[in-house]
Amino acid sequence: MREARHPGEPAPAPAAGHEQRDLSPRAIALFGIALAATVVVCLILAVWLFDYFAAREAKRDVPRSPLATAAPPGEPRLQVFAPRELQALRAREDEMLESYGWVDKGAGIVRIPIDQAMELLAKRGLPASPKESAPPAKAKRQ
């Protein structure tokens, strides 16, 4: 019950401390426990999901890139003498264009010098395709 006050009388001073009705330690503890449980469940779900996707990817039998399994190089692989390396590459290509050799020995395909190949092509001409060898049939008019 409230005490009756007279109209000019000051209000009593509040008691020192805190308000018990606004702060519930039990509610805060329950919220903290629920939050921690939610985080743990999300972490477990994420680990399971990553394991599932890793297993699914492994079943595809896609060969790994050799770069993924090889050890990283110890130093940058730069062309130190680029003009000299280009000159060596061109020399190897010129040797292939100017010499005889097997392309596929089992199939009987050989390589001949480019100059000789151009002369043979000029003498014999290009082989005719099957469509050009047969004259087109003309439709009869009535």
Image (tube, rainbow, N blue to C red):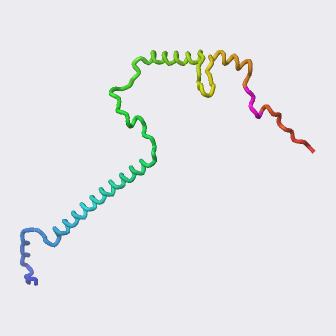
Q: Is residue 73 left or right of residue 84?
A: left
Number of on-image labels: 0
Image side of residue 100 versus residue 32, left or right:
right
In the image shown, does 138 or 9 lie closer to the viewer?
Answer: 138
Residue at the image point whose x is 52% and y is 17% from the top? 92
Q: Locate residue 123: give its quadrant.
A: top right
Location of residue 110 by image quarter: top right
Residue at image position (74%, 22%) is 125
Residue 77's quadrant in the figure?
Answer: top left
Depth order, front residue of 27/40: 40
Q: Position of residue 132 (x, y in %)?
A: 78, 32
Could you tell whether 105 is left or right of 41 in the image?
right
Give the residue displayed 41% in from the left and 21% down from the top: 79
Q: Compared with residue 137, is residue 92 higher up or lower down, i.e. above or below? A: above
Q: Position of residue 12 (x, y in %)?
A: 6, 75
Rendered position, 69 above or below 24 = above
Residue 92 forms part of the magenta stretch: no
Residue at the image position 56 percent from the left and 18 percent from the top: 96
Residue 129 lies in the magenta-colored region: yes
Secondary structure character of the magenta stretch overall: loop
Please state the horizontal and vertical placement of residue 19, each as a whole percent of the image. 13, 70
Quadrant that contains the C terminus = top right
Image quarter (top left, top right, bottom left or bottom right) of the N terminus? bottom left
For residue 94, above or below residue 24: above
**Viewer-closest of 100 and 41:** 100
- Residue that extends furthest to the right in the rendered view of this protein: 142
The image position of residue 29, as x and y in percent, is 19, 65
Query: Height in image: 122 above or below 49?
Result: above
Magenta part of the chain: 127-131
Q: Tell me, yes or no, if residue 23 can be seen here.
A: no
Residue 108 seen anywhere in this rendered image of the structure: yes
